[in-house]
Image: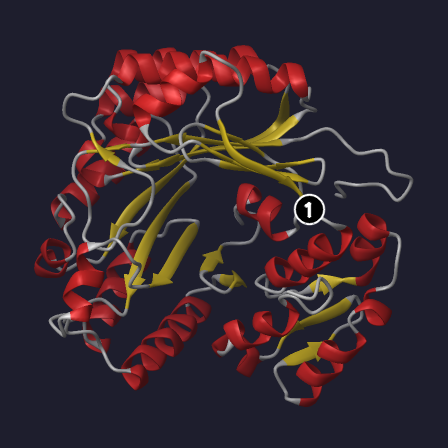
Amino acid sequence: MTTHMTNGASKRTEAVYIHIPFCTNKCFYCDFNSYVLKDQPVMDYLQALEREMEMTVKASPPGVIKSIFVGGGTPTVLKPNEMEYFLKTVKDHFPVWDDNIEFSMEANPGTTDLEKLSVMREGGVNRVSFGVQAFQNDLLTGIGRIHNTDDVYRSLENAKKAGFDNMSIDLMFGLPNQTVEMLSESVTRALELGLPHYSIYSLKVEENTLFHTLYQKNQLPLPDEEDELNMYLLLMNRMKEAGYDQYEISNFAKPGFESKHNMTYWFNEDYYGLGAGAHGYVGRMRHMNIKGVNPYIEAVKHGLPRLDSFTISQEEAMEDFLMVGLRVLEGISRSRFEQQFGTSLDVVFARPLHKMVNAGLLDTTDEGYKLSDKGVLFGNEVFAEFIGSLSGK
């Protein structure tokens, strides 16, 4: 599964990320590129997106598409007719799909009725990821979510009726006023659903969010470090006991249900990034699109809506390979590194690899290296060792 052959010829891109930036409201912790739906030019945006798809595939024709991920915002705020139009444009411009394509869409439990889910299923979507975050209504209100736990059960029921069997939910820990017991209850209720995949993230207080403002005023009652560590240990143990494989720092799946799209990122492979504020990586070029809805719509009239694009050097690409690859718990492989870069992992990163193995944060494997049990808890310290270690940043 390599992106770049050592002779310089590159394989065609097989993964697509599409950004729908609209939301019903802005969550208090969110710093994503998202805008409240009211009075937004949704159809103009979807038409602009189609133009970007057209220009993108012309500039860099796709291979057989293995994964499509529609994120946001909340893509499920699209009305059924808008959703139908959008999914048709995706199929028109990326027509050749792998037999086992994973076509995921993020959804908010408050925005998914049976009609909309049926349109999604008919349009090719075969995996839905619901942003649940917690199973306590007061915690949900406290982070600015518009749904309650009843909406979660109703949405999952509707998704099953519409023909979805591959579903995932997101949970969060380290939320204001959340206790270890509350997380435990959320994990119990999540596991009762018996879904094939769960993502469980810790809250990061990001700049330009309401939570950041409150945090600076000392008005954000976050759990202390020890509680947060206990939350993470609890969820790792509970997921393992329930038969889920922790295949990445924040992701748990039944065998065969790991997110193919996220694996594209973690293997540092190419993907198209389409839509306002989307990031893409094709042929050692990274790009970021213009963020605002109207500026994006305007920009597409004159060409690809790039805010920035830059070539990634061999050194930087190698660092990225380690940084993202070590997030996956089975670790990084020497052979995949050599296929992508034509050089030896152990030679290039000899010093930081030895240092992390000696510190007990990395284990050696037959294939290469992986985070140790301790390394999983202190992943960021490990990744930091590789940032700029070659490119001199």
Residue 200 in the image, given as x and y percentages of width and height: 37, 60
| Visible residue check, residue 147 | yes
Query: In front here: 366 or 62?
Result: 62
Look at 70% across and 24% down and name the residue there: 63
Say if 98 sits above or below 369 in the image: above
Residue 306 in the image, given as x and y percentages of width and height: 51, 29
In the drawing, does residue 268 fall left or right of residue 334? left
Say if 319 sits above or below 237 in the image: above
Residue 229 in the image, given as x and y percentages of width and height: 36, 80
| Mark 1 residue type | Ile
Query: In front here: 34 or 149?
Result: 34
Say if 193 sits above or below 202 in the image: above
In the drawing, does residue 287 fall left or right of residue 205? right
Query: In front here: 188 or 1?
Result: 1
- Quarter of the view holding residue 42: top left
- Quarter of the view holding residue 18: top left
Look at 57% across and 72% down and name the residue there: 384
Give the residue at mark 1: 312
Disc tally is 1
Q: How is the image coloured?
A: secondary structure
Say if 223 sits above or below 29 in the image: below
Residue 77 in the image, given as x and y percentages of width and height: 24, 28
Quarter of the image containing the N terminus? top right
Question: Dot 1 surroundings within 10 Å: few (below 14), some, or many (20 or more)?
Answer: some
| Visible residue check, residue 122 | no
- Quarter of the view holding residue 33: top left
Quarter of the image containing the C terminus? bottom right
Element marked by disc 1: loop
Look at 52% across and 46% down and name the residue there: 259
In the drawing, does residue 94 fall left or right of residue 76? right
